[in-house]
Image (cartoon, rainbow, N blue to C red):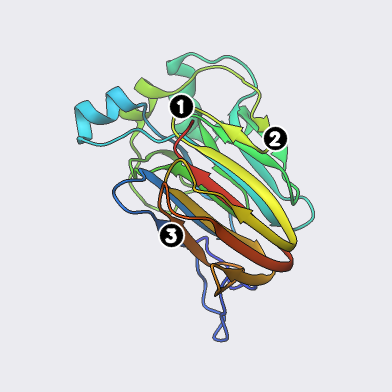
Amino acid sequence: MWGSPETEPWLRNPQRRRIGEIWFPASDSVPILVKLLFTSDNLSVQVHPQDEYAQQYHGSRGKTEIWHILRSEPGAQVAIGLREKATPERLRAAALSGEIMDLLKWIPARAGDTFFVPAGAVHAIGSGLALCEVQQHSDVTYRLYDYGRGRELHLDRALEVSIPEPFEARRNLPFECPYFRAEKFTVSGSHTIHAPARNTLLIALEGTGSVGGEPIGAGEAWELPAGMGPVEIVSPGGVFLATSEPR
C-alpha cells in the first residue's frame, strides 16, 4: 500500500506496478538480509525487538538495521527515535491518538545519508524515498501506529521493547555494529576483492559492470563466499555496497 512505481534503475518496471521491497536474502551462513525499499506514502510507525526478546517470544533473531538513502524527493524524511523522553503510558496514549507523529524525531533524508536503527528504536520511513536497508535476517515487527489503515497494532509488545528516549541516528559508511558491517565504494576501472574473510553480499547501487567476468547492474546482488580467490569488479563508475558479519 505504500510502495512506488518509481523503482528504476534498480528494477525494470514497464507496467509501473507499485512495489515496496526487493529482498536479497543471503545463504544460511550469512544471517543478513538486504532490501531495497521504494515509498510513495509513509510506512507504519513500528519497532523491532532485541535478540533476547525475539528469541523468547518468536524463536527468532532481533532486528537491528541501517538505511542508506539512494534517492529522495524534496522534503522526504525518516523518523528514528523520539524527540524527548517518554513514559510507556505516554507512548501508548500517543500511539492511540496519532500524536505519536509529533513525538517522533523526524530527520530530513537525502541521497547519500545513512541512518542507524537499533532494535528498540521507534521508527518510520516517510514517502518519496528509495533506500537500501541492511538488517539482521528477521521479520519480527511491532506496529504502534498505521494512519488508520486497519492493520493490527502490537502496542503491548512494542512498549516492552521500545527505547523511550532520543538518540543520534546519523552514521557514516563504512559502518559496523555487533550484527553486520557495511561499506560503500565506487569502481572506476577495476577493483579486486582479495579472498574475503567473511561471506559477503555485494549489491550494485549505481551503474553497470561485471563481477568475476559476469555482468552486474544496479539492483542486483552477488554473494561472495569467505576465502574464495580474488574477485575482480570492473565498472566505468559503478557504486557498490558490500555487507558481511562484523570483523
Residue at 59%, 44% in the rendered image: 67
- Closer mark to the observer between disc 3 and disc 1: 1
**What is the x, y in percent for residue 24?**
43, 59
Q: What is the three-letter code of the residue carrying label 1? A: Pro
Q: Report whether 199 appears left or right of 14.
A: left
Q: Which residue is mark 2?
A: 172
Q: Quarter of the image holding residue 25?
A: bottom left
Mark 3 and mark 2 residues within 8 Å of each other at the beta carbon: no
Residue at 62%, 63% in the rendered image: 233
The residues tagged by marks 1 and 2 sit, at their Cα atoms, a distance apart of: 16 Å
**What is the x, y in percent for residue 234?**
66, 67
Mark 1 or 2 closer to N-term?
Answer: 2
**What is the x, y in percent for residue 148?**
46, 49
Secondary structure, mark 2, is loop
Q: Report whether 240 appears left or right of 119.
A: right
Secondary structure, mark 1, is loop
Q: What is the three-letter code of the residue carrying label 3? A: Trp
Q: Can residue 128 be seen in the rendering of this structure?
A: no
Residue 174 position (above or below residue 38): above
Secondary structure, mark 3, is strand
Q: Residues within 10 Å of mark 1 (few under 14, many from 20)?
A: few
Q: Which residue is mark 1?
A: 178
Q: What is the three-letter code of the residue carrying label 2? A: Asn
Residue 218 position (above or below residue 155): below
